[in-house]
Image (cartoon, grey):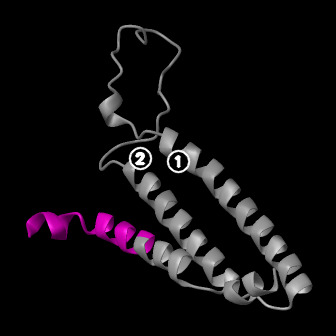
């Protein structure tokens, strides 16, 4: 029980992912499917950003990099935050927004051609 309480953030990510997956699989409306995909992507992005965070850590900028005695000081990676997940998620955010924009543009074209956004009605017209 203590693990569930202390790791509540993981349960939130799982809940968001399941909401997004449910929306993608169960809804017939194409806009609702795209919203579900966006929720799913956001849950993954927030998960990776939270992985990169550490308590009592600092930004990975080495102080006193040039000067006397800098070579003799050992650098411990444990005291720095890992910037890689944050940088990768910035790219993922750009991809998610682009995907959402293209998907909505395609849905707009589908609505113009078929007059509906319901998947079943579109399949009947095809």
Q: Is residue 74 above or below residue 54?
A: above
65 horizontally vs 14: left or right: right
Looking at the rendering, the stretch of residues picked out in magenta corresponds to 1-17
The quadrant holding residue 122 is bottom right
Q: Residue at x 75, y 86 (%)?
A: 124
Label 2 Cα neighbours within 10 Å, binned few <14 / some 14-19 / many ≥20: some
User: Tag 1's secondary structure?
Assistant: helix
- Residue 93, image x and y in percent? 63, 57
Query: Nearest the camera: 118 or 56?
Result: 118
Q: Quadrant of the C terminus?
A: bottom right
- Residue 108, image x and y in percent? 85, 80
The quadrant holding residue 5 is bottom left
Dominant secondary structure of the magenta stretch?
helix
Q: Is residue 48 above or below residue 31?
A: above
Label 1 Cα neighbours within 10 Å, binned few <14 / some 14-19 / many ≥20: some
Query: Nearest the camera: 109 or 60?
Result: 109
Q: Residue at x 69, y 83 (%)?
A: 119
Residue at the extreme right: 112
User: What is the number of the mark on residue 86?
Assistant: 1
- Residue 100, image x and y in percent? 71, 68
Residue annotated with mark 2: 52
- Residue 90, image x and y in percent? 62, 51
Q: Quadrant of the N terminus?
A: bottom left
Q: Residue at x 91, y 83 (%)?
A: 113
Q: Earlier in the sequence, mark 2 or mark 1?
A: 2
* Residues at circles 2 and 1 in contact by the CB criterion of under 8 Å: yes
User: What is the number of the mark on residue 36?
Assistant: none
């Amino acid at each position: 029980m203590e693990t569930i309480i202390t790791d509540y953030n993981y349960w939130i990510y799982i809940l968001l992912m399941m909401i997004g997956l449910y929306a993608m699989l169960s809804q017939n409306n194409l806009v609702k499917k795209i919203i579900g995909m966006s929720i799913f992507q956001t849950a993954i992005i927030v998960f990776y950003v939270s992985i990169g965070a550490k308590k009592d850590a600092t930004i990975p900028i080495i102080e006193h990099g040039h000067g006397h005695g800098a070579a003799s000081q050992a650098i411990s990676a444990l005291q720095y935050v890992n910037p890689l997940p944050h940088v990768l998620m910035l790219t993922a955010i750009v991809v998610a927004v682009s995907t959402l924009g293209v998907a909505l543009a395609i849905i707009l074209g589908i609505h113009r051609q078929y007059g509906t956004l319901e998947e079943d009605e579109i399949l009947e017209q095809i």
